[in-house]
Amino acid sequence: MKKIGVVLSGCGVYDGSEIHEAVLVLLAIDRQGCEAVCLAPAGGFAVTNHLTGQQVAEQRDVLVEAARIARGKIRDIKEVKAAGLDAIVFPGGFGAAKNLSDFAVKGSTASVNVEVVRLLKEMAAAGKPIGAVCIAPVLLAAVLGKQYSPTVTIGNDAATAAEIEKCGAKHQECPVTEIVVDRKNKIVTSPAYMLGTRISEVADGIDKCVKEVINLI
Amino acid sequence: MKKIGVVLSGCGVYDGSEIHEAVLVLLAIDRQGCEAVCLAPAGGFAVTNHLTGQQVAEQRDVLVEAARIARGKIRDIKEVKAAGLDAIVFPGGFGAAKNLSDFAVKGSTASVNVEVVRLLKEMAAAGKPIGAVCIAPVLLAAVLGKQYSPTVTIGNDAATAAEIEKCGAKHQECPVTEIVVDRKNKIVTSPAYMLGTRISEVADGIDKCVKEVINLI
């Protein structure tokens, strides 16, 4: 059974992984007969109250909170190498831009979590497919942009697209139910909630993204 | 557009709403062209670390954490009456048995959150459909068992089924991808992760459950 890494960044759209996107990625992987291997880095993050939208004076741990989405079945990303995976997918949510990187603050000059950098570079060097949805394609731009010039989408947000291009990646506009496929680099992206207003349209794009990632293995 | 209440109990299988089930309920509602209205009661609950499975010395708020699944679009259940909904669905997770009630500790003698009791009784009195998956059917047994004797399923767990029958409800065994429909009471239930080992089979049961709930409106 093919193993697809799913890199989580917490549990909640405003301070972690976007929950719908993460669950829809897990569903699409299972429906393709593959095994999802949930991964996240350990480390603190600032909590946002999702009822008020306000950041609060509390820290939680990325790996511990991501375990909620994974029903406890999750590994610390530092223990996992590309050799143990056939492909990898990044759901979105602000966690990708705040916990896995500081893209939300620094844009194209963002630093990315050292273990995410390592695993992404290992996957790319091994020619293994990489998927990312919503804001998570910025991680691929930040880590792989200069070496591989991948083509990705985050929908049609001009400011984010400009930061992606400053990283050396190319941005291509895309509707929520569709995907952008960079065949040369085996990178597949979809806008998800960067554009989506309905969970069903987000599901359509994520389903296509995961199918194409698995197809490229 | 028909409005379907979705009653959440936090965010995470061990101390709140089972996240996959909740998202799959929201997806099924949207795919049927209906509007999900997320609801939860305010109030503290004891946190379980989902990485270790251990309860920790921390309290969080049910409504605030449930807002993560709802992407912030959630209402306090006390503000919502049956008159504003066409149907209601309860995802599972230990939150249904620990936060919305104390069924996990007290079984058939459980107390149920006063606002959940009120809304369930209003829905039943108005002849509006009620769906519940995983462990959440125990709420229907505890609140509606004596008056309506509803038939429900939580899969095939004999001990839980016995507690359900002590409430005055009837338990019917059911596989994870199927549903039990009590047409007289307009109550639809499915085992979800009480039996499921794969998210895709849980999704199949939940999809059928939500479709039938909407069909019964």
Image (spheres, coloured by chain):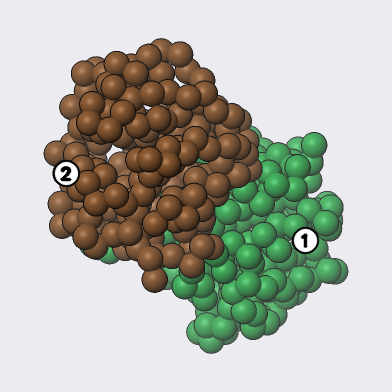
Chain colours: A green, B brown
B194, A91: nearer the viewer: B194
Subunit that carries the residue with mark 2: B
Give the residue pinned by disc 2.
B118
User: Residue B170 appears at what percent x and percent y?
Assistant: 38, 23
A139, B189: nearer the viewer: B189
Residue B184 location, quadrant: top left
Subunit that carries the residue with mark 1: A
User: Which amino acid, by three-letter code, is at mark 2?
Assistant: Arg
User: Residue B145 appears at what percent x and percent y?
Assistant: 27, 28
The residue drawn where x is 79% and y is 41% is A2
The residue drawn where x is 47% and y is 39% is B181
Whole-number angstrom distance, CA of label 2 to CA of label 1: 47 Å
- In the image, residue A73 sits, relative to residue B82, either above or below, namely above
Give the residue pinned by disc 1.
A212
Q: Is residue A145 left or right of residue B81?
A: right
User: Residue A150 appears at what percent x and percent y?
Assistant: 74, 72
The residue drawn where x is 31% and y is 51% is B128
